[in-house]
Image (cartoon, rainbow, N blue to C red):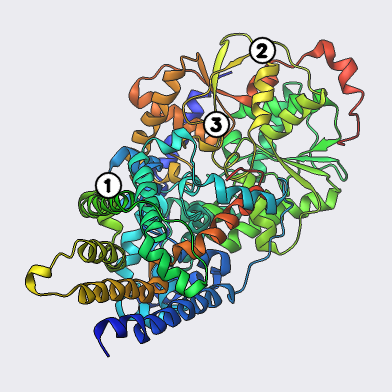
Amino acid sequence: MSLNREAFNKFAEMAGQLAGMDTPVEMPDDQRVANAKRVMMEKMDAPKAAMLESCIHCGMCAEVCHFYMTQEDGKFTPILKLDLLKRVYRRELSPLRWMHRLYTRDVTIEDLEEWQELVYDTCTVCGRCSLICPMGIHIAAMMPIMRSAYSAAGMVPAELHLMDTQQEQGHLFGVGKDEFMGLIEQLRSQGLEIPVDKDKADIMVLTSVLDIMVSQDSLVAMIKIMNHLGYDWTFRTDGYECANFGMLSGNEEGHLKASRKIIDAAVAIGAKKVIVAECGHSYPALRYEAPDIWGHALPFEVLATSEFLGQEVEKGTLKLKKAEGAHTVTFHDPCKNNRWGGVEKEPRAVLTALGLEIREPESTGRTNICCGGGGGAFLINRTADYRQRVFELKRDQIEATGSEALVVSCGSCRLNFEVGKMKSNWGKPVESLVEMVGDNLDDGARGSTAGSPQNSTQ
Amino acid sequence: MTLLEFARGPAMEWSLIILVAGVVLRFAGIFLLTRHKTYFRTKGGSTLAAGLRTIGTRSAPTPDLEHRVRFSHYTGYLWHIGLFITVLFYTPHILFFESILGFGWPGLPTSVVLAAAAVTLAVLIALLIRRMVHPVLKTISGFDDYASWFVTTLPLVTGLVAFGHIGAGFGWRYETLLAVHILSVELLFVYFPFGKLFHPFSIWFTRYMIGGQMEQRGVRA
């Protein structure tokens, strides 16, 4: 299957208009600064303080950051992106604050304006910098604090702010519950059996606005897979959207609100598992971040689509035919699934089950280079040039493998690759993992596999 | 009281008091902050094992991460090892430690220590120049970076000057050169807890913490 070009172009056109549609947050400048500083202080704790105290300014973090690697500009150094947080910590909370106040400048509105580009446009919160730091500073784990500070200051980039606002209103890109159900009915009319709003189900499956608008084949593939497996599953109209623009923009309240829709729906039906669609950030947003914001453990398991598929393959419940077409593939690990979620072997197990030879690029798995559009950067129009350069870095690594196709398991990575392909006339097919599985379900093996997991997710 | 007596006596005592008190104050200030609780279901194995493992593995990054930081990486090793050799295996230093600790250890030949000190000094000078011209380093560097370089390099320089009796031609006595050397070490002690030189104390904790944090998500740090 391939991307719906017409829908993709329409989506790209809509994305290009987002900034102009946003209503900026009105707030006096001193209030913006005060809010940002308050959030930075509230979010600081002992481990983060120890890390901020430990930077030796070696600059190694820059050398593995795709934005510095492609721009060679010192301002893109990851630890510098945390400088405002470091300054607030030093002046307000550090044990040496009496000393730091003598020579550490306080944060100003001009600083906030200058750093916005570093916090959103040129950081995809991919986490690669956190892997190289010789001091063990988890730089990327502190970037969400910066974004929360910007959200409190009303200084989130227009595109992300608009999406965050829309999500709180119950839709994204104009796609809400009605549009979701409209698509479901359309697919049902094509003969697909789709459980929606069941009162009880073992598994709740999520989708994303990208799947609904652009990658409908991914949604169809997931439905076919779940039906093939024979599990007791459902979509829920009160909790179907996995994208979380609260997290991407730094609005913790919005993050939790979006997550609570899913959590409440899953709890209501007694779901044992919630499967997140192929949408990178949505996985850690629900699996790891939401419980910490909520202050409670989730009473169900959260799985990324690729993780779920890999587990089913490894259990022997998901039998696949050999995939037709490309024989050699490169898998692009979405940063948010791998470096932020530990999903690495599962998608590879799926590709192996499809009879494909996996050709790993120089940087793969946990050291994988980001597509360039993660962390919401894909929607920020002014980052297009930065993203394209990162895409080219990634493209060159993939080309060096000599594989015939690229496989991804994240909708925004996929779209970013598609945009990059168009701009650079790159001909490599970019495939969705879930769509490849949906296309290659071994119906012959269904009798022997569908029975065992029937009504059981264990 | 001569300058040498001052350096060996009250200056040494006070610099060590400031070093210890400063480190304790800084650690206390950090670890008395609250800790945010984790509510998500952890994924990996033992965070204790992962944390301890990361203390070691962070010294040797994987090749695809390391190939762009090789210069920083190896020069870092070089000057730290050179400094340790100079500090710990120069026989007069060992005698000084023995007078405090009550025990000593075999020293290395002076020529070896001298070579280590010279290499260390050369690398430190190269790193200073690099810090001033490299697009990343010159952007992120501030007073502390240059002050730390200065107080680290000064004892090496004064030590070499004392060793070579450089300055004798100007009428400076060896005792004066030695006193200046000891005072430069004491300056290092005094500055140690207040800037980035604190890192030899904190590195164990921060490496341990990131190892554990990433392990909770099933990721090898």
- In the rendered structure, find residue A214 and report the number of the disc placed on it: 3
Pointer 1: residues within 10 angstroms few (<14), some, or many (20+)?
some
Q: Can you identify the residue that label 1 sits on?
A: A73
Residues at discs 3 and 1 both on one chain = yes
Label 3 or label 2, whichever lies nearer to me, is 2
- In the rendered structure, find residue A355 and report the number of the disc placed on it: 2
Residues at discs 3 and 2 both on one chain = yes
Can residue A38 be seen here? The reply is no
Label 3: chain?
A: A
Q: CA distance from mark 3 to mark 2?
A: 28 Å
Q: CA distance from mark 1 to mark 2?
A: 43 Å
| In this view, A345 is above or below A135 | above
Q: Residue at x 35, y 72 (%)?
A: A107
Amino acid type, label 3 = Val
Q: Residue furthest bottom?
A: B1
Mark with earlier residue (1, 2): 1
